[in-house]
Amino acid sequence: MPHDRMTVLTAMMDQGVIPVFFHPDAEVCIQVIQACSNAGAKCIEFTNRSDFASHTFLEVARHFAKADPSVIMGVGSIVDAPTAGIYIANGAKFIVGPVLNADVAKVCNRRMIPYSPGCGSASEISQAQELGCEIVKLFPGESVGGPAFVKNVLGPMPWTRLMPTGGVEPEEASLREWFGAGIVACGMGSKLITNPQVAAGDWRGIEDRVRATVETIRRLRAA
């Protein structure tokens, strides 16, 4: 199944929530990601957060290329171009970072890979757009001003597509406030895929929680 730039961007916006997850054990990652996929969240952000994380990612990406090609594996916590290149070579279909880095944008654009850099001001968002970023990560979402910040940016820059990470809860009230402000998607880590669930191997519980979040977003958009 081809996952070109436009397909990936559309999938990210369609599912509305991007599960953010990392575990050093590839088998745990496979179970969690499959649960997310089953729940309707096919785009997963694997975070580059430890030594040898790229090796774990490669193993997981190879698994899904065969077992469930509908899964779209992306990578987060990318702050430099060499690391982005490693993950793209290992199968990453989108790149996310906590900061804006022009060299990462160039690497991603050269390979037609979506890049969502972390931005916290209108100027940074504008710079990201100048570098070809269609969906800009708002980070840390709550700290930079939350839903009010989103509304204030979209006023003079209505073409902007924002994806906050940090401060978005899987509960309906939080999702209503953020999506009501105008975001196109959000990233969610341990509030969506809880540490106790992972520790207990509660893959069905993770699937149910992710499905409920995806369905809540769909319902809020249709209202």
Image: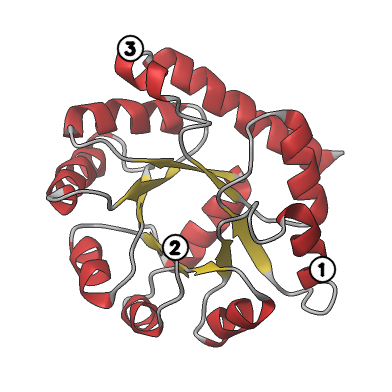
Q: Amino acid at mark 2?
A: Pro
Q: Earlier in the sequence, mark 1 or mark 3?
A: 1
Task: Determine which residue is flagged by label 3.
Answer: 200
Q: Position of residue 71 (x, y in %)?
A: 37, 42
Q: CA distance from mark 2 to mark 1?
A: 21 Å
Count neighbours of disc 3 (C-alpha within 10 A) and say few if under 14, some if 14 to 19, many if 20 or more.
few
Q: Amino acid at mark 3?
A: Ala
Q: In front here: 197 or 67?
A: 197
Q: What residue is at 18 percent from the left and 66 percent from the top? A: 86
Q: Which quarter of the image is occupied by the C terminus?
A: top right
Q: What residue is at 18 percent from the left and 58 percent from the top? A: 90
Q: CA distance from mark 1 to mark 3?
A: 42 Å
Q: Is residue 206 left or right of residue 76?
A: right
Count neighbours of disc 2 (C-alpha within 10 A) and say few if under 14, some if 14 to 19, many if 20 or more.
some
Q: Earlier in the sequence, mark 2 or mark 3?
A: 2
Task: Determine which residue is flagged by label 2.
Answer: 98
Q: Secondary structure at mark 1?
A: helix
> Looking at the rendering, which quadrant does residue 16 occupy?
top right
Q: Position of residue 181 (x, y in %)?
A: 80, 54
Q: Position of residue 120 (x, y in %)?
A: 60, 69
Q: Is residue 40 above or below residue 55?
A: above
Q: How is the image coloured?
A: secondary structure
Dot label at residue 205: none
Q: Earlier in the sequence, mark 2 or mark 1?
A: 2
Count neighbours of disc 1 (C-alpha within 10 A) and say few if under 14, some if 14 to 19, many if 20 or more.
some
Task: Determine which residue is flagged by label 1.
Answer: 152
Q: Position of residue 70 (x, y in %)?
A: 38, 42
Q: Tally the numbered discs.
A: 3
Q: Are marks 2 and 1 in contact (CB under 8 Å)?
A: no
